[in-house]
Amino acid sequence: MEFQADRTFSGYRKGLVSLLLFLTAAAVFSQGNPVGLKVYPQGPAVDQEFKVEIYLYGNFFSDVVVLPPDRLGVFTITGGPYVRPDVSRNGIIITFTLKSRRKGKHLLRSFTVKSGQAVIKTKPEWITITGIKPKVMWRIPKRNVYIGETIPVSLEFSVWNTLEIPGSVKVRTPAHSWFEEFNSGSKIKADKTNGTQHFIVPLKNYLITPIRTGFLKLLPARVLLNNNKSLYSNSVTLRVVPLPRAVKKSGAVGDFNMKYSLNTEQITSGDRLTVKITLSGRGNLNYLNLPVPVIDGKVLKNPVKEENFSAAADGYNGYISRTYEIRKKNPGSYKCIIPDFYYIDSKSGRVKKIKSHILKFTVVKEKQSAAASVKIREQKWVLRDINSAAGMAGMADVKIYKIPWVYLLFLPGPVFLLFFMIIRRIADRNTGWKIPFVLVLSVLLLNGAVHKNGNTEAGNGSISRGINFYNNSDYTKALDEFLSVDPEHVSSTALFFDIAACYNQLDDYVKAIHYLRKVLKLNPSDYTARKYLKGLELKNALDNQITPSVFPDPNYLFILIIVIFNVFFLFLIVYLRKKDIRIVLLLIMLSVFLFICAGFFAYSVHYLHKKTGIIAAEKSELKKIPENIARPWIHLKNGTAVEVLETAGGYRLIRTGDGILGWVVSGTVMFDK
């Protein structure tokens, strides 16, 4: 009996302990809704992973087990459970990742939570699964286009809830069209509706120009996602229709402006006249035809082409031009007729017309026309004295700021200030004689700097003969004499100017421009050379040229900096003696002026060190890459001023005054230095 009693008491004790544990767990779970469930994102898509988070709140969870529902239905658990503490609410968070196989509103059954002998279930959750899938699509402004019309098309990636950037995009060029990619800088668009976030990711932008009527098909594009899954866009078909009859000749669709110009309104019999037509705006600049000028019923041929346009969201933007050369022997008045230009306005869809234009010019005989005689006298430039190389006249041949000892000219002002500080305590302060002494010393040093020593007699014979030949209109012999003179022994600027004058009389305008640019490289302040250079460029229809130098001459700026620097110290001494506040204001103004001059000096010296030159070859080919197999995309006219940026093999990368970049053969550039 005693043994039976012990067993009964032992069972009673175990039951009591179990009851206490159950009550403890129940007390823990009863504290403020200790179990919660959250699903995000709301409204996930089919085959898109989403999270289910179970929150357990309480003071202690030593033995917690979470069991998923026995039947998941359309859901599949893809990961979990992942446990992490929830410090803010003294609990833990258990996360599962799920995926749905079918769209619609589906019930996610309860998860079972066990802690000790306590069991509690989460509430069932209805989850709406959307049928939205990521897709790739072509976006085009219209389906009916004209032949030759340039329209933008873009490839976009549409994705929901989770932003994803594709790994690669492959697009096939449609047949019978021009197809060019451009970068429009588009940004990712995002919006949020009904708890679902939608992203539009721009992938590629193209300009497409159909070159045949009928139907043009944009083939499906292939997009490779980061998970190596491929998506394909839909194919889009465009209907290409013929142009209206009035526009067939030009084939232009867009918004344009046109300009016409003659290099001169009067030429001498046999001289060259140039007609330039420039069309600017936006549209299909890659496919249209410019109107061709007509003189005496004859259509001009073989123009020099110039194109500068780039792809953008509204078509090609920029300009194209055609330059025609004319030579007329018979004197008289002529008309150059530019025919009407029809195009379709891309905004309104209507046909517009740029009316015909008439350019008038006159051809005169060289000997019989008084006006022509005046013109010839103006063309014959006055030669310069090549042996003049002393004093300020020779400053152009010497870069004063490159002579090391010239920087001693900055010392008189500080030295005089130091001298004044030493003797200021001496009773005799009569230092008025020292200021003229310092000025005289500076002038002597400056004269030594600009004086160019050399044997000027070495080329006196050739110079004299060259001048005589030039005055007798024998320009070939005069040129030979000037070219035989060594520039090191004479004034280089005067010699180069006289050589340019000979080339001008021989109608070799390219070399005349080249030597005038050499003059301005040495002496930027030469107004006469700059005037003649501008006249030659206008005469040969050379617009937007890169200047060889900027005004003023760095020598003058350097001398001005020296003068202002020393004057600053002289006025500083005056202030130390008189303590006048007005002198302080003057010192501030001198400081500001000194820094401005120094800035202009640094810029002008930097500009002189640029590698500039002109194109010396007739119709030089400009290529996009430095390879012999590359096709030329622009022909530059000889005499075009360029800046050389770099060299690769037998090619040079150049930039024109219009901002055109490209590669030309090295031998086609004549440098200004």
Image: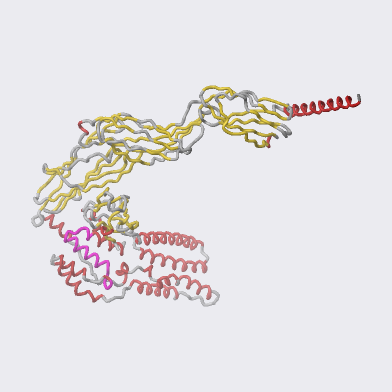
Who's the residue at 58% across and 25% down the image? 72
Report the front residue among 383 and 653. Answer: 653
The residue segment tinted magenta is 488-512
Residue 511 vertical position relative to residue 261 in the rendered view, above or below: below
Q: Quadrant of the C terminus?
A: bottom left
Q: Position of residue 626 (x, y in %)?
A: 31, 53
Q: Specify whether residue 600 is in view.
A: yes
Q: Image quadrant of residue 385?
A: bottom left
Residue 267 vertical position relative to residue 227 in the rendered view, above or below: below
Left or right of residue 323, residue 62 in this image: right
Who's the residue at 52% across and 22% down the image? 104
Q: Quadrant of the N terminus?
A: top right
Q: Position of residue 346 (x, y in %)?
A: 30, 33
Report the front residue among 16 and 516. Answer: 16
In the rendered structure, does residue 338 fall within the stretch colored magenta?
no
Residue 310 vertical position relative to residue 491 in the rendered view, above or below: above
Q: Main secondary structure of the magenta part?
A: helix
In the rendered structure, does residue 501 fall within the stretch colored magenta?
yes
